Image: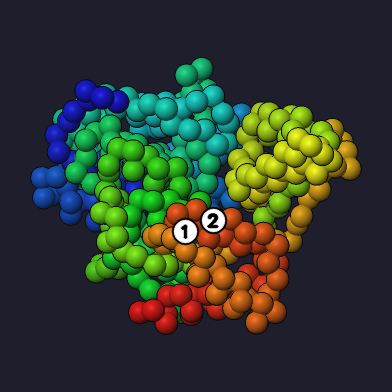
Amino acid sequence: MEGLTCMPCIVQKYGGSSLADLEKLKKVADLIARVKKQNIDVAVVVSAMGKTTDNLVGMARGISRSPSRREMDMLLSTGERITMSLLCMALNEKGIDAVSLTGSQSGIITNDRHNNAQVIEVRPIRVQDEMEKGRVVVIGGFQGVSYKREITTLGRGGSDTTAVALAAALNAERCEIYSDVDGVYSADPSAIAEAKHLPEISYQVMQEMSTAGAKVLNAHAVQFAKEKQIAIYARSTFKEGRETVVRMLPPGTLTGIQAVVSEEDIIRVRLSGKETLQNFGWALTFLEEEQVQIKELSVADVEKDPSWSKASFVVSRKNVYKWDQIQKKLAEKIGNTIAFDTHLSALSLIGEGLNKSNETLIETLKLLKENGISVSGITTTAFRISLLVPDEKIQKSVAICHNRWVEENV
């Protein structure tokens, strides 16, 4: 990626909701044409239109209960190809020379994992060549090619990663992420009417929000932006005005809790007993082979009395392919020393310096208890306090904590 240069440009990414039908797609073409006519080079990354990806998944499940990951990648990558071709046609109709490229044609090189590949390198030579000819380059997001020449996909929200990685490789001035919301909010604005718009936010806080369940930006994309120091501008596609800029901020610029985020359908896996470490090691290897990401990892090895040894981790079920089969294999291999806690959701308070004292955590626990909400687990970092609560209590928990830590502190 180093050493590649091109004319100053911007990279734009448009999500599926912005391209849900032909009329919206034509409006996006108008927006791109407006930028291009200002003599700005622009590369555009697109997602599949509307619910295309969900529909493709449904079709696959209608054929097979457990389709192979490779064939799913071949299938799902077609969604973005439809969008990019149609958008180029719309641009051409407006007198804008445009060309569509797949992830592999754009030089998006990934590791050899299907359904949740990681970008390891970007070789944007073809993109640069087309831009030097004055063309708008429209790239299918969410997809790449492995070093084994296999088509891969980057997982849900992977088009964000495509856009940021491409912006870094092209030395772009900025990366603009367009969706149906005008930036990042202190909570999901569709669930919390009093959610506060955040004009700017640090990479670290945004990454914690994304990892904890916020849907505006992909966590891997934010990590990539942080590493490459690419500013992300999160904007609404059709509503001009506000935006959120994600960038490096000096420590202490924004303090306290900035957002309250939730993630549903969490499964906590617990291991215990004398063979905890051996079983845990096997489980980690198995889950890595199955491409299952784990978080909130905790291990306690009691040397004097191994029967007290314990380990646990958390899995986000919605991001795991064939979880029921994976859980069955874990149980069969490890036996009755492994347990699965279900019907849980994660409530997360996100902000700066949350580990300086325990006051926020103490008051939050008290507040939840007063409202009849039990807490099954707690993890903390410098930017996050996460608590496991019952699924049916998560929306109430978010509303209570947002009111206390965001609304009351405005």
* Circles 2 and 1: CB atoms closer than 8 Å: yes
Residue ID at (22%, 29%): 128
Q: Quadrant of the C terminus?
A: bottom left
Neighbourhood count class around disc 1 (C-alpha, 10 Å): few under 14, some 14–19, many 20 upward: some
What secondary structure is found at the residue carrying circle 1? loop
Q: Position of residue 130 (x, y in %)?
A: 22, 30
Q: Is residue 215 at least partly visible in the picture?
A: no
Q: Is residue 393 left or right of residue 86?
A: right
Q: Please give the count of numbered marks on the rendered protein.
A: 2
Q: Residue furthest front?
A: 304
Neighbourhood count class around disc 2 (C-alpha, 10 Å): few under 14, some 14–19, many 20 upward: some
Q: Quadrant of residue 114?
A: top right
Q: Is residue 223 at least partly visible in the picture?
A: yes
Q: Is residue 31 left or right of residue 81?
A: left
Q: Residue 355: which numbered mark, if any?
A: 1
Q: Position of residue 214 (x, y in %)?
A: 49, 59
Q: Is residue 235 left or right of residue 10?
A: right
* Amino acid bearing label 1: Asn
Gap between marks 2 and 1 measured at Cα: 7 Å
- Say which of 58 and 403 sits in front: 403
Instruction: Answer with mark 2 or mark 1, whichever residue precedes in sequence.
Output: 1
Residue at which label 2 appears: 380
